[in-house]
Image (cartoon, rainbow, N blue to C red):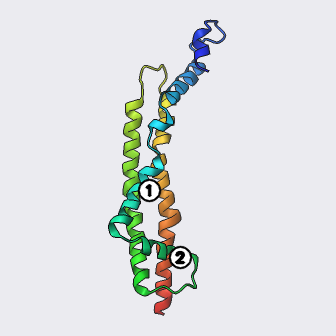
Amino acid sequence: MLHRFYKNKSTSNNPFKYPERARFVAAQMLLYRSKPEDRLPTLLIIVVPLLGILTATKSFKVFSGGFKAVLNPYRPLSKDLRGQAASLFRLLSKSTAIVSAIGFLISFINMSLGMDFSYPDMRSVIFGNIAAALVAPMYGMVLIAGLFEPVVFNLKKRCDTERK
């Protein structure tokens, strides 16, 4: 699509005659410059360290037990396993926040290295790249607020009701 602007030198298709057209062409040139397969998927930046934590602590059984306890509240679960699951999900919640910040830094550095400042108007391109760099913290916050913290809350609530 971009090559037709440069092959055809007529004034109607010249992208540099109209500034908004030049911004659009510059943004598309930057987007098509890096291939999606060259970039590490952002979700892997978050999930791989969490799997590493589960592997290092050898707590896949506790992880699955915590989820089963939340999904089926009538399933009996030992007090020891419930406490371990709550502490494991709290650890995963804290480490997700750290990993998402590191993922943002990696994405931001990768974005900065791939930018070309020779384009006439970089403001329109920079905002798109910053939005792409903010994907890692968004994934992290979704995991924390939508998955880990509700499990911790539910497990603690079950512990408190059994004490009474």
Q: Quadrant of the N terminus?
A: top right
Name, please, the residue furthest toward the top.
Answer: 10
Report the Cα–Cα distance between label 1 and label 2: 20 Å
Q: What number of labels is visible?
A: 2
Q: Quadrant of residue 73?
A: bottom right
The x, y position of residue 122, in whole percent, is 47, 26
Taking 105 as reference, is 17 above or below it?
above
Taking 67 as reference, is 162 above or below it?
below
Write down the residue under mark 2.
Answer: 68
Task: Identify the mark at residue 47; answer none if there is no mark.
Answer: 1
Classify mark 2: residues with Cα within 10 Å, few (<14), some (14-19) or many (20+): some
Earlier sequence position, callout 1 versus callout 2: 1
Classify mark 1: residues with Cα within 10 Å, few (<14), some (14-19) or many (20+): some
Please tell me which residue is depicted at 62% across the width and 14% down the height of the picture.
4
The x, y position of residue 101, in whole percent, is 38, 51
**Most foreground residue, 83 or 56:** 56
Taking 16 as reference, is 25 above or below it?
below
Please tell me which residue is depicted at 59% across the width and 9% down the height of the picture.
7
Please tell me which residue is depicted at 56% across the width and 22% down the height of the picture.
25
Name, please, the residue furthest toward the left.
Answer: 56
Residue type, mark 2 in image: Lys
Please tell me which residue is depicted at 49% across the width and 47% down the height of the picture.
135
Q: Are marks 1 and 2 in contact (CB under 8 Å)?
A: no
Task: Identify the mark at residue 75; answer none if there is no mark.
Answer: none
Q: Is residue 112 left or right of residue 26?
A: left
The x, y position of residue 5, in whole percent, is 60, 14
Q: Is residue 42 left or right of residue 71?
A: left
Q: State the SS at label 1.
A: helix
